Amino acid sequence: MKINYHMHSQYSIDGEMSIEEACEKAIELGLKEIAFTDHLDIDWPDPNYEFGALDIEKYLIDIEKNRERYKDCLKIKTGIEVGLQPHVLEEVEDIIVTYPFDFVIASIHIIQRMDPYQGDYYKNRTKEECYRLYYEETLELVKEFSNFDVLGHIGYIRRYSPFPYEQDEDLICLSLIDEILKVLITKGKGIEVNTSGYKHASKTPMPTPRILARYKDLGGTIITLGSDAHTIDDVGFGLDLGCSVIRESGFKHITSYTERKPEFISII
Ligand SMILES: [Zn+2]
Ligand SMILES: [Zn+2]
């Protein structure tokens, strides 16, 4: 499927491509539609990483300029990936309602003021404790917060985990994951298939096919597809594989967004 709904440009502090470079690469790969989803993680615990410092005005102007420029060959959507923490939800809400985003991903990157990327999160905890804490926090946040379209990269906690991957590790927290999926479905929210997961030892997207199938069984219908690209090399990463997994999980559509309204694109 020629679509990528999770891309970071240089407006994210960890993005390495300009909006223009990303568009050029998307066109070269034959993508028909992309959404930029730069980071807005308010109150990131490490002051050396200003993930909350997105210059939204400039970001939106830049996207608009490129939208016009490439209008004959590429649909470009203005998205954002907001990081949720319990104490920032009001501030996040204010930003989302202030700007005309097409699409909002809500992600959990920080758990109880800890960044799993830094490694301390995993110290003095078993694998089960690490995973459980992440899913418990996710459940509370999706209950509390509603102004988003899809929940980002379910299973993110495995990305920096020092524990060896085990094939059935989804089962550790399956009942908590079910609770999260039920809340999302009740609220009319979707999930994304994040193909950056294929870089992990599990060689699966986030979430895994098992969780994707659970979302379907529980009545979920909204799936977006994205590679979480921060560089031009990843603009097309894993998208065909991700789309196959969505299809094999029984879904007949993936979702695009315009002004926060979902549209369903056939993948059969
Ligand atoms: Zn993320
Ligand atoms: Zn991302």
Image (cartoon, rainbow, N blue to C red):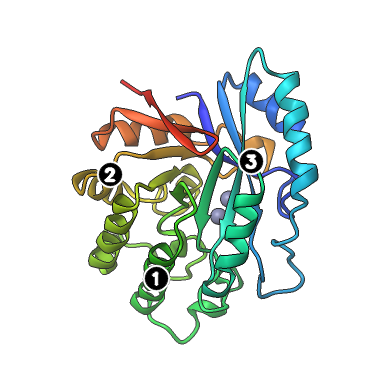
Q: Which mark is residue 140?
A: 1
The reply to whether the residue tagged 2 has its Cβ within 8 angstroms of ligand 1 is no
Residue 3 lies, in percent from the top left, at 51, 28
Q: Nearer the viewer, residue 205 or 72?
A: 72
Determine the CA span between mark 2 and mark 1. Answer: 19 Å
Q: Residues within 10 Å of mark 2 (few under 14, many from 20)?
A: many
SS category of the residue bearing label 2 = loop
In whole angstroms, how far apart are the C-alphas of marks 3 and 1? 27 Å
Please give the name of the residue rendered at 37% of the width and 79% of the height, measured from the top-left corner: 129
Q: Secondary structure at mark 3?
A: loop
Q: Nearer the viewer, residue 44 or 86?
A: 86
Pointer 3 or 2: first along the chain: 3
Q: Residue 263: percent from the left, percent from the top? A: 42, 29
x, y percent for residue 117 = 58, 67
Mark 3, residue position: 100
Q: Residue at x 69, y 61 (%)?
A: 51
Q: Position of residue 97 (x, y in %)?
A: 60, 51
